Amino acid sequence: MAKRSPAPASPGPQPEQVHSLQQQNTRLRQQQADDEQQQAVDQRYARSQDRFRTVFENSPLGQKIIGPDLCIRQANQALATLLGLKSAKKVVGRKIMEFAHPDFVQDWKHLQQELWEHKKPCFVLETCLVRVDKSVFWCRVTSVLFPDEAGELGYTSLEDITARKQAEEERARNLSLLEQAEGMADLGSWDYDLHGQEFRWSEGLYRLFGLPPGQPVHPDIYLRLVVDEDRSRAERLVRCLTAGSTGFEETLRLRVGKQVKTVRLKAVVFHDEVDHSVRVLGVVLDISERQRLEADNLRLRLTQQQALFEAVQAAEENERRRMAEALHNGIGQLLFATKLRLDRLHAPVLHTAPALVKARTEADRLLSEAIRQTRVLSHELIPLILEEFGLEAALKDIGRKLSTPRLRLRSHLTLDEAAAPLPPTLQMALYRMGQELALNIARHATGATEGSLELETMPGWVLLRAEDDGPGFAPAPAGPQGLGLRSIRDRVALLGGQLEIGAGWAGGAYVRIRIPLPVPAAP
């Protein structure tokens, strides 16, 4: 069998073919990579669309997408609920302008025109919309443009801000009322931030202190303006304010310009949810005018009371004088004349009957005692020693006359040399009260050996004290008080004073009277 000759070897690929195949392979790989990249992009886009749709549809804020014709192309349920519609489908195809409040239509038109003409990349608007049930609500509208396959679309978010607007309106009304109140009542308010240490004043407070509004202030301003007598209270106030530890209420006198103002400050502390102090709010009330009016009213009442007292005392002294003259010129003279007639009786029978002699002697003694007591009573009714020698001599005369071998009654007077002399009507009242108190010691302090009557004057006041070492006051009876003590109380009340009765620490009793001195008349 003849051998087959080997086939001729095929020629190898040409370089051009190899290069072409390599380029084709590269393009295929690039196409595959591009396809994979596009697929990844599409997947990411799809996921992004899913996320956007989820956010869009489930957002608590109203969401909508509009076209250049301003018609709503897509909306979420929150927007439908906001507008009072049952489903989002009821919103699609409508324009938001259909729900605009008449007072805000022009604002909508202007802002939407600027947005679509690219004068603004976005806009934010706070406006009023009207629901299908005609109720009105405030909303914050945020709108931006974004590109779409068919051109540009508008994306809008609507947030219901009715509660915030109502709170702002209420705050504005309250602020207006506060400003009016501050203007009418000389009142100012402040707010101190404990964290930022920021001290904010209202316009009324700047006006009260005579400072330009907005000028920086610090709590130390009270220390700079306070009068020296009130500095300790101002320091305590500033410590409480800057520490925020507790609220406070304080009265200070402050130098404002050329005048001194009396202000009343009151503050409360506000705390956060963990009970840490965060703010101190306070008010400042100028009470200078009120204090002046109160002082004028007090001066008027004291003047009227003083006039009433002087009228009562004048009537009383006139009656005493009339009674003294009646005793001296009437009963006294009659008793003296009777004694003269009795002295002229020298009947012989008087010397022969011892009983008659004794009776005549006793009658003569009784008449002499009656004349003496009449003269003493007449002098007591008209205290000539007070008129002629003054109050100190008159009080000492009371002690001297009422002292006995068993009871020593001392009288002492201490006058403030810098003070004006006591008015005569007040001297008479003090004398009468001192006389009654001394008589009470002499009559009722059974077993007392020492008694005192002291009068002392000090700035604004006069003090009258009576004390003894007797058994003290008996328990108060159920009936009315004695005439003497009641008359003293009446005098003290008319003089606007105070009366205190008590027992001494070592026994005995005391009566202390404190009477305000008359207010000097304004120049």
Image (cartoon, rainbow, N blue to C red):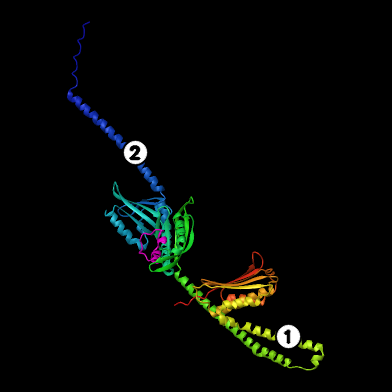
State the image quarter where residue 116 is shown: bottom left
State the image quarter where residue 355 is shown: bottom right
Mark 2 = which residue? Answer: 43
Residue 136 in sight here: no
- Does dot 2 land on a helix, a strand or a loop? helix
Circle nearer the viewer, 2 or 1:
1
Mark 2 neighbour density, 10 Å: few (under 14) some (14–19) many (20 or more): few
Residue at figure coordinates x 45%, y 56% from the top left = 239
Residue type indicated by callout 1: Leu
- Relative side of 12 to 50, left or right: left
Residue 229 in sight here: yes
The quarter of the rendered structure image containing the N terminus is top left
Magenta residue span? 201-224
* For residue 340, above or below residue 429: below
The quarter of the rendered structure image containing the C terminus is bottom left
* For residue 157, above or below residue 104: above
Location of residue 54 in the rendering, given as x and y in whole percent from the top left corner? 39, 45
Closer-to-camera residue (515/119): 515
Mark 1 neighbour density, 10 Å: few (under 14) some (14–19) many (20 or more): few
Location of residue 315 in the rendering, given as x and y in whole percent from the top left corner? 59, 84
**In terms of sequence position, does the residue under pointer 2 or pointer 1 come before the other?**
2
Mark 1 = which residue? Answer: 366
- Does dot 1 land on a helix, a strand or a loop? helix
Report the Cα–Cα distance between label 2 and label 1. Answer: 141 Å
Location of residue 500 in the rendering, given as x and y in whole percent from the top left corner? 61, 70
Residue type indicated by callout 2: Gln
- Relative side of 260 to 404, left or right: left
- Relative side of 467 to 59, left or right: right
